[in-house]
Amino acid sequence: MEEYQGVWVFIEQSEGEIAGVSLELLGAGRQLADKLEVSLAGVLLGDNVRELSTQVIGHGADIVYMIDDPVLKYYRTESYMKGVNYLAQKYKPEIFLYGATPNGKDLASAVATDLSTGLTADTTMLDVDVEKRLLEASRPAFGGNIMATILCKKNRPQMATVRPKVIKALPFDGVRMGEVVDETIDLREEDMRTKVLEIVKDVTKTASLADAHVIVCGGKGMGDLEGFKLIHELADTIGASVGGTRDVIEAGWLPHELQIGQTGETVTPKIYFAIGLSGAIQHVVGMKNSELIIAINKDPNSPIFEAATYGIVGDAFEVVPKLIEQFKQIRVKQGGEVSYV
Amino acid sequence: MHIVVCVKQVPDTKIIKINPKTNTLDRRSAPAILNPYDAHAVQEAVRLKSILGTGKISVLSMGPPQATEVIKKCIEIGADEGYLISDRAFAGADTLATSYALSKALEKIASVEPIDLVICGKHAIDGDTGQVGPGIARRLDIPPVTNVIEVSEINSNDRTILVKRKLSNGYELVRVNMPCLLTVEKEINKIEYSPLPNMLKAARYKSNIWSVSDLGEVNIAQLGLKGSPTVVGKMFTPPKLEGGKVLEGTSDEQVSQLMDVLLEQKELLNVK
Amino acid sequence: MSEKFDVIVVGAGPAGTACAYTCAKNGLKVLQIERGEYPGSKNVMGGVLYRKQTEEIIPEFWKEAPLERPIIEQRFWMMDKESTVSFGYKGLEWGVEPYNNFTVLRAHFDQWFAKKGVEEGVLLINETVVTECIVEDGKVIGVRTDRPDGEIFADVVVLADGVNSLLAKQLGFHNELKPDQVALTAMEVINLPKDKINDRFNLQENQGCTIEIFGDSTKGNLGTAFIYTNKESINIGVGTTLSSMIKAKMKPYDLLDYLKTHPMVAPLLAGGESAEYLAHLIPEGGFHAVPKVAGNGVVVIGDAAQLVNAIHREGSNMAMASGKMAAEAVIQAKERNDYSESSLNSYREALYASFIMKDLEKYKDAAHLFENSPQYFKEYVPMLNQAMSKFFTVDGTPKKEKQKQIIKGFTSEKGTFGVMKDLYRAWKAVK
Ligand SMILES: Cc1cc2nc3c(=O)[nH]c(=O)nc-3n(C[C@H](O)[C@H](O)[C@H](O)COP(=O)(O)OP(=O)(O)OC[C@H]3O[C@@H](n4cnc5c(N)ncnc54)[C@H](O)[C@@H]3O)c2cc1C
Ligand SMILES: Cc1cc2nc3c(=O)[nH]c(=O)nc-3n(C[C@H](O)[C@H](O)[C@H](O)COP(=O)(O)OP(=O)(O)OC[C@H]3O[C@@H](n4cnc5c(N)ncnc54)[C@H](O)[C@@H]3O)c2cc1C
Ligand SMILES: Nc1ncnc2c1ncn2[C@@H]1O[C@H](COP(=O)(O)O)[C@@H](O)[C@H]1O
C-alpha cells in the first residue's frame, strides 16, 4: 500500500472548458496533499486540452497527467476509463477525487470497479487522518441531521466524488509552476461502442437556479400547493427564482429540477430565502454557502436558524404577505434604483 | 429483445420519521417501497417492449426475502419475470460488492436467455450513490450510459439505441451498441396506471429466489461486508453553523428590519 | 374475456377480509379488491377490537396478530368544563388469556388480517377502486374498476366497501345517508413513551385502558369522545352526528382541538407528538337504517350495511360476524349453484337471527331520542357534576341537607316530572 502516493483530482472538461467543481477540488486536494506532504496532481483527458494544464497548475496542482487524443474529444465512459485506469495503475495515487457531476460519478464508478477499490459518493466534507493516511470523506447520512465519515482502509486509491460548490476554489495563481506528464494510450475510434452525436447546452430551469442571484426556497411548511403559491408570489415580487426542498418536490408542488440540496442542486446565490423548511442537513449542504440567508420558520428550534444570517420566528402566512406588501409600496429597478409608489 | 431491470427495495424516505433525539430513523414509520427511479426504469422497459411489439422483461433485485414485494410491484408495471438474490452472504454490501453480486446474477440470467439491455435507476433514494449501475456495466464489460432522460430510437437491425443523456448544463445525444446499460432519470417517462390483468398476475406471482450457491462460481470474498472496501468510520452531527441573528419584535417590526437588510442589497432585486 | 372468480370482495376492512378469508378457507376462488395502498392504510377506528368475533374466524389470533394492549379497564366520564364524574371497571382477569378486548391500530391489524386471507388463497389487489357493479339481467355478474382492462367477473360480489357504500347506493339498496344517521369523527394518534402512558393511566406492562367521554367533550352535542391507550401512543377522537355538527356549525378538527386542550384531558396527552390525523364517518342509523343486504349475485356486509352499534361503539365485530355469515351463505349458494337473491337470502336470515340485528333492534330508538333531546348532554351532565361537587365538598353542611339541595338543583328548572320522564325514556331506549 505504501507504493500509493499523492493526491489526484480528475479534471472534468467539456469542449475546452474546465468544470467549476474540478477547480474547487484542486483547492481541497491542495490542503490534503499539504497535510500528507505529497504532491497534488490533476488528471486531464481530452482532445486539444494541452493549454488547460496552465489553469490546472494555477489553481493548485503540482503535476498534470495528460492524455490528449482525438478519441477523447467527448466524455465517454469507455475511453476515459481506459485512460484513467492506465494512469492510476502506472502512478498509483493514494487519494483520487472527482466532481459529483454526471460524468464524474460515471467515471469514478467505473474506475473504482476496475481498481477494486472503495468509492464514497457525493461527499460534502473532506479531511485526512495523517497518521493512518486515511481519507475522511463525509456526507449527510441517511436519517436526520447527521453526517457519516466513510473510510476505505485496505484498498488504494481512496476515491470520492464531491458535490460541486461545497468547497471554494483557490484563486488562480499565474506564476505557479508545475510539471506536465504527457501520456499516450492506444485508443481507436472503431473500438468504441458509444458515439456522442451532439451536445446540446440548454439554459434549463436548473441552469437558471444554479446561476440565480436571489432564490426563494419553500418547504413543506407551506402546507399545500395552494399555500406554496405564496413562495411564487414573493419570488415574482422581487424577481427571484423559486426552489424547493425534497419534500416539496415529492409532494409535486414543484418540478424536480428545482430541488435544492444534496440530491438536487447546490446553489450559492447572494440572497437565499428559506421559508417553511426545517433545514435538514441534506438541504443545508445544498445552500449553506449562499451569501445572505434569511429564514422564516415558526419553530424557534428549527435547525435552519443555525444556517441563517437573519431569522424570523413566525408564521410564513403572516410574515411573507407583509413583506410582499412592503415591496409593493416601493419599486426597485435592476441596478438598485428605488422609488416609492 | 431481453431487457433486465435492476430494482432495489428502499425505505420510503418521504414518509420516514427521524427521532430528533437520537437522530436515527424510526423504522416503524418507514414502509419499504420500490426505489422510485427503478419504477421508471421498469416503465421504460415496458415502453420499449411495446414499441418493439415483442421482447421480455426480467427484473433483478438483491435484498432480504421481503424484497419480493418490490418484484411484485414490477410485475404490476409490466415485467414478465423476477429474480431475487437473497442470502446472508450478501448483507452489508457497499456499491462495489453489490455490483459484483448483481453482475453474477445477470450472468446467470443471461446464460439462459442472452441480455440485450440492462436498465438501472439513476440512484437509490436511501443512499443515493448512483454507483451500482456503472459498476455492473464495467463488470459485464458493456458500455454504460448514465442519467438517461430519453430513449429516442431503438434499432434492432444494427443493434444500437439512441439516447439523450442529461449533463450538468444540458444534454447529449449518444448512440450506443447493445448490449449496454442505462441508468434513468425520473423525467424519462410517466408511470402508467397498470391494467387490471397485470395486477392479478402480480398478486399471484412467485419470484425466483436465489442464494449464493445458485449463482455458480462466485468469489465469496467479494460479497457482502467482506467484499466492501468502504466502512462507516464515525457518525457526527455537522459542525454548528454560526447561526445569525434572530430578529426581535412584533412581526411588523421584524419585517421592517428585514426590509432594511434587503434594501442594502437592492441592486439584486427587481421589483416590478 | 376476463377471468371469472367465485367471489369478488370489495374492500379489505374487517368485514371484507372476514368474508374473503372464510370463502377461501372453504375452497372458493376469491378476489379481494382494496383501494388503499394496502389494507388498513385508509382505515380509521377508535381502536377497540373485540375478541369473540375475531376468534371465531382466527382462533387464538392474539398470539400473532399485531395488537396494541389488552384492555383491562374501561372508564366512563361525564365531563363538564372543569370537572368530571367518572366510573368504570378494572379487572385483571381481562389481562390474561383469553382476554376480553384489545386496542389495535387499524393500519397494522387490517394488513395482518388480510395477509391471513392471502395465506388461505385469497387473491388480493390493492390500489384499485371498484367503480361499479356490472349488472346483467338484474343480476350482479362482476365489477368494473378504475384500471385499464378493468372488468372482472364472479358469481357473487360482496360489498364490504364501508360506511358510505357507493356501490350499494348504485344498486339502489339504500339511499344517501341522512345527516342524523352518520357520525363524523376526527381522531388523532399521539405518540407518547410507554412509561408515560403506564404512569398516567395507572397501567402495567401490556395493560390497556379505554375512556369514553360524554358531555363537554362534544360541547354538549350528541356524540362521544374517546381516549384509548396503545403500546406507545394514544388514540383520541371525538364525533357527533353530522346533523349536530351542521346545527352547531362545528368542524370535527376544531372539536378535537377543544378536547385536546380541555383541562381534564390535556395532562394525559402532555408532551405527546402527533403522529396521524384522521377523519371518518360512522354509521349510526342503527336498526332502521340497515339496507337490503342480499340481491341477485350480491351481498352487503359490515359498515356498508350500516351494522354499527353506536351506543357501544361496536362495529368491527359486527363487520367480522356479518362477513362470516355472508361467506357461509355464499358457500351454500355455490353448493346449490344458485346465486339468486332468494338463495343468498340465507345470509339475511342469519344476520337477523344473530346478536347483530338483535342488538341494533334493542337500541333502535336510542340515537333518535338523544338527538331530539339535547338536555341529556347539555344539561344533565353539568348538573351531575355540580351535584357531585356539592356532595363531596366538605363545608360543614350536613349530608342530608346536601342531598336535598342536589335534588332541588336537578328538578327546579324542569320540575320533578320532566326529569323523571327523561330518565324513563332514556332507560327505555337503552334497556
Ligand atoms: C438520501 C436523502 C437525500 C435527501 N436529499 C435532499 C435534498 O436534496 N434536498 C432536500 O431539501 N431534502 C433532501 N432530503 C430530505 C431531508 O432530509 C428533509 O426531509 C427535507 O429537506 C425536509 O423538507 P422540509 O424542510 O420542506 O420539511 P419539514 O422538515 O417537514 O419542515 C417543515 C418546516 O416548516 C415549518 N413550518 C410549518 N408551518 C409553518 C408556517 N406556517 N410558517 C413558517 N414555518 C412553518 C416547520 O416548523 C418545519 O420546520 C434527503 C433525504 C435523504 C434521506
Ligand atoms: C373514529 C371511529 C372509531 C371507531 N371505534 C371503533 C371501536 O373502537 N371498535 C369497533 O369495533 N368499531 C369502531 N368503529 C367502527 C369500525 O371502524 C367499523 O365498523 C369497521 O371498520 C367496519 O368494517 P368494514 O370492513 O365494514 O369497513 P371499513 O373498515 O371501512 O373497510 C372498507 C374498506 O373498503 C375499501 N373500499 C371502499 N370503497 C372501495 C371501492 N370502491 N373499491 C375498493 N375498495 C374500497 C376501503 O378502503 C376500506 O379498506 C369506529 C369507527 C370510527 C370512524
Ligand atoms: N440491492 C440492489 N438490487 C438491485 N438493484 C440495485 C440494488 N442496489 C442498487 N441497485 C440498482 O442500482 C441503481 C443505483 O443504486 P445506488 O448506486 O445504490 O444509488 C438502483 O437504482 C438500482 O437500479
Image (tube, rainbow, N blue to C red):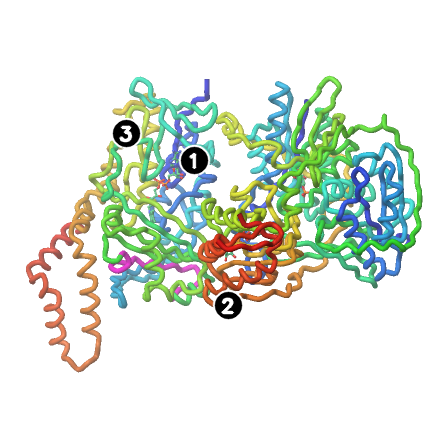
Q: As shown in the figure, which amino acid type bears the numbered disc 1?
A: Glu
Q: Quadrant of ligand 2?
A: top left
Q: Residue B252 at what x, y percent from top left?
A: 46, 63
Q: Residue A197 at what x, y percent from top left?
A: 76, 28
Question: Could you give the CA–CA distance between mark 1 and mark 3, rounded to whole angstroms?
Answer: 21 Å
* Residue A183 visible in the current orientation: yes
The disc placed on residue C294 is: 3
Bounds of the magenta span? C201-218
Residue at 85% over, 40% down: A45
Image-based side of C298 in relation to A118, left or right: left
Q: As shown in the figure, which amino acid type bears the numbered disc 2?
A: Glu
Q: Are marks 1 and 2 in contact (CB under 8 Å)?
A: no
* Location of mark 1 (residue): C34
Residue at 17% over, 51% down: C431
Image-based side of C249 in relation to C142, left or right: left
- Asked if the magenta segment contains residue B222, the reply would be no
* Location of mark 2 (residue): B248
- Asked if residue A303 is positioned above or below residue C406 in the image, the reply reads above
Sequence order check, earlier mark of 1 and 3: 1
Q: Chain of mark 2?
A: B
